[in-house]
Amino acid sequence: MLDNLNTHFRKCFDDVLGSRAAAKLLRRVEFHYTPKHASWLNMVEIEIGILRRQCLNQRVFNLELLESEVAARQQDHNEEKRTIAWSFTRQDADKKLGRHYVSQLAC
């Protein structure tokens, strides 16, 4: 699974590795892109944080109890159809993280 960074596209593999090496590697790769408006990793981190605060902030004595706590929280979450409202834009990221970008590697 990849985010939509500009280096995560087939053309960039060709540009960096050459057509032959890229084709050999890409036969073993299947691209699955995340939504352009969100980061799947951020969503996972947010969900794990909520899970920790809501049902893992106590001692869990066995796997069955852990599974039941997590399943109950997941069911509540799904029934309420909660979503994440993103406010951090790509432009915000450019301002904050631009000094870390390596423009020579961008395709």
Image (spheres, grey):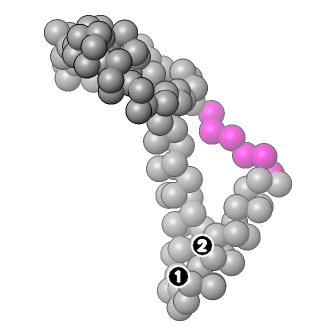
Residue located at (57% from left, 63% from top): 51
38 or 88, which lies in front? 38
Where is residue 8 shown, x and y percent of the image?
A: 38, 21
**Residue type, numbered disc 1:** Gln
The secondary element bearing badge 1 is classed as loop
Secondary structure, magenta segment, majority class: loop
Dot 2: within a 10 Å radius of its alpha carbon, few (fewer than 14), some, or many (20 or more) residues?
A: some
Give how far across and how far down residue 93 sits, in percent: 37, 21
Q: Quadrant of residue 7?
A: top left
Q: Residue at x 47, y 50 (%)?
A: 45
Answer whether residue 47 is magenta in the image.
Answer: no
Q: Which residues are magenta?
A: 80-85
Residue 93 versus residue 1 in the image, above or below: above
**For mark 2, what is the residue?**
55
Foreground pick, 8 / 21? 21
Question: For the point 64% across and 70% down, which residue is it?
Answer: 70
Query: Is residue 9 in view?
Result: yes
Left or right, 67 with reference to 27:
right
Left or right of residue 90: residue 99: left
Residue 31 position in % (x across, y down): 49, 27
In-front residue for pair 46/103: 103
**What label does residue 58 carry, if any?**
1
Residue at 51 percent of width and 75 percent of height: 57
The three-letter amino acid code for the residue at tag 2 is Cys
Marks 1/2: CA distance?
A: 7 Å
Contact between marks 1 and 2 (CB within 8 A): the answer is yes
Residue 35: image quadrant is: top right
